[in-house]
């Protein structure tokens, strides 16, 4: 079955550490997205990518970085510059921008 | 700019009650509109969509009509079930297709 796989499901970070969240899709979608979800605030866009080797900042990109070296993969790194990283992170993809997005099951990041 | 406003929750209903979750939007041009559902600990799933004015999206007994004159896309279901308990998100895709804009979500609990 095609879908989006996020790993790990739970992740813990120590102060000052960078951590990388994985997102892989086998839907052959061109566009991929990273969102952050906090209670009561809905989803906020961190980064998005419409094609391989290209990505754009979303509304809250500070303290995060991404890469898009392969069509199926769009990893997100939460750097030590992100001062409040505790959140639920969702990866999504769509066949092209504007079409419905398909979501992974998310990664919950917590600070030790 | 583009934005989505949803009625605040939480909403608690008895089984077989009628459901309405209000959603209004602000957008330039002609956006596409979506409802997504999120079950606990999971990502979002597309529930229904509408791409132009007066379109009605429907799925699993849920319906929403794209009303350009009132800039609304209210979600309705005639008879809710316990299994409908989840968080519901209204979203729009702007006419560039580059971004989705999500509402803050409305939590629904259906009690037997």
Image (cartoon, coloured by chain):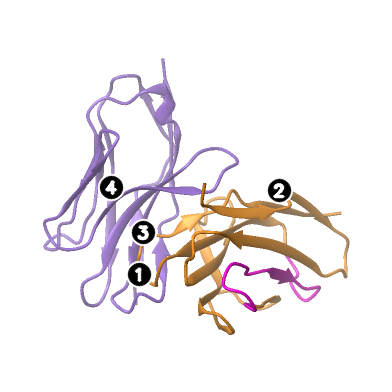
Chain colours: A orange, B purple
Q: Look at 42% across and 22% down and name the residue there.
A: B82
- Residue with the mark numbered 1: A98
Check if mark 4's residue and mark 1's residue have beta carbons within 8 Å. no
Q: Are marks 1 and 2 in contact (CB under 8 Å)?
A: no
Residue B101: percent from left, percent from top: 40, 66
What residue is pinned by disc 4? Answer: B22
Residue A65 % position (x, y): 69, 77
Q: Which residue is mark 3?
A: B91
User: Which residue in the structure is indicated by mark 2?
Assistant: A9
Between A90 and A70, the residue placed more toward the observer is A70
The magenta stretch spans residue A71: yes
**Are labels 3 and 4 on one chain?**
yes
Residue shown at 40% from the left, 76% from the top: B98
Q: Secondary structure at mark 4?
A: loop
Q: Badge 3: few (under 14), some or many (20 or more) residues near its Cα, within 10 Å? A: many
Q: Which residues are magenta?
A: A68-84
* Number of marks in picture: 4
């Amino acid at each position: 079955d095609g879908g989006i796989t996020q790993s790990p499901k739970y992740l813990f970070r120590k102060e000052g550490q960078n951590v990388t969240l994985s997102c892989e899709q086998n839907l052959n979608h061109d566009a991929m997205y990273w969102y952050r979800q906090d209670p009561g605030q809905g989803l906020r866009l961190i980064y998005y990518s419409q094609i391989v080797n290209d990505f754009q900042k979303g509304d809250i990109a500070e303290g995060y970085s991404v890469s898009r070296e392969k069509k199926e993969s769009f990893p997100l790194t939460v750097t030590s510059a992100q001062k409040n990283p505790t959140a639920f992170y969702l990866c999504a993809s769509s066949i092209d921008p504007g079409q419905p997005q398909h979501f992974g099951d998310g990664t919950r990041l917590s600070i030790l | 700019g583009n934005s989505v406003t949803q009625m605040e929750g939480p909403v608690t209903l008895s089984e077989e009650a009628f459901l309405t979750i209000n959603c209004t939007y602000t957008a330039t041009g002609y956006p596409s509109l979506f409802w997504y559902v999120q079950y606990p600990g999971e990502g979002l799933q597309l529930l229904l969509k509408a791409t132009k004015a007066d379109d009605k999206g429907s799925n699993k007994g849920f319906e929403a009509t794209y009303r350009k004159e009132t800039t609304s896309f209210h979600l309705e279901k005639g008879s809710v079930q316990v299994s409908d308990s989840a968080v519901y998100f209204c979203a729009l895709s702007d006419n560039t297709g580059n971004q989705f804009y999500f509402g803050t979500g409305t939590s629904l609990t259906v009690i037997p």
